[in-house]
Amino acid sequence: MPEISRFFGIVITMWFNEHGEPHFHARYGAYRAKVAIESGAVSGELPPRARALVVEWAALHRAELLENWALLRERRPPHRVAPLE
């Protein structure tokens, strides 16, 4: 499960061999969520502040996330994505 970004204690990963709509995974401590890249829909649990940061970050990097999704579908390594600062 390649890590593609990390900011404010939030770890963003994307997995090889994923199915369904393009998405990524966010981890913050014991919390875990799956985030749809195109719609920004979040399933799972994140504290409100972490959730807001992840949604903001995803909106800023939507094109890069979709590119990484395509790379991973081809079993190629994804690119790092800049964190929120």
Image (tube, rainbow, N blue to C red):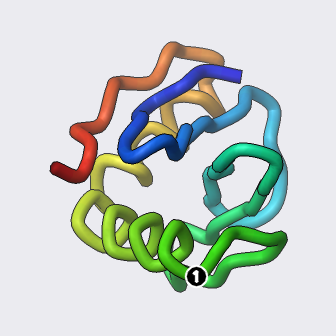
Image position of 68 (left or right of 16) = left
Image height of 49 relative to 22, above or below: below
Of residues 1 and 22, which is closer to you in this image? Answer: 1
Image position of 18 (left or right of 41) = right
Q: Secondary structure at mark 1?
A: helix
Residue 21 image position (x, y, % from top left): 71, 66
Image position of 47 (left or right of 67) = right
Q: On the image, numbered disc 1 is attached to which residue?
A: 48
Badge 1: how crowded within 10 Å, few (<14), some, or many (20+)?
A: few
Q: Quadrant of the N terminus?
A: top right
- Within the image, what quadrant is residue 60 found in? bottom left
Q: Identify which residue is drawn at 63% across, 37% down.
A: 14
Residue 83 image position (x, y, % from top left): 27, 43
Q: How many marks?
A: 1
- Within the image, what quadrant is residue 36 found in? bottom right
Image height of 2 relative to 15, above or below: above
Image height of 54 relative to 55, above or below: above
Of residues 8 and 5, which is closer to you in this image? Answer: 8
Residue 4 image position (x, y, % from top left): 45, 30
Q: Identify which residue is drawn at 73% across, 27% down.
A: 16
Image height of 79 relative to 42, above or below: above
At label 1, the amino acid type is Pro
Image position of 53 (left or right of 48) = left
Q: Identify which residue is drawn at 33% across, 74% down.
A: 56
Q: Identify which residue is drawn at 43% across, 53% down.
A: 66
Of residues 59 and 67, which is closer to you in this image? Answer: 59
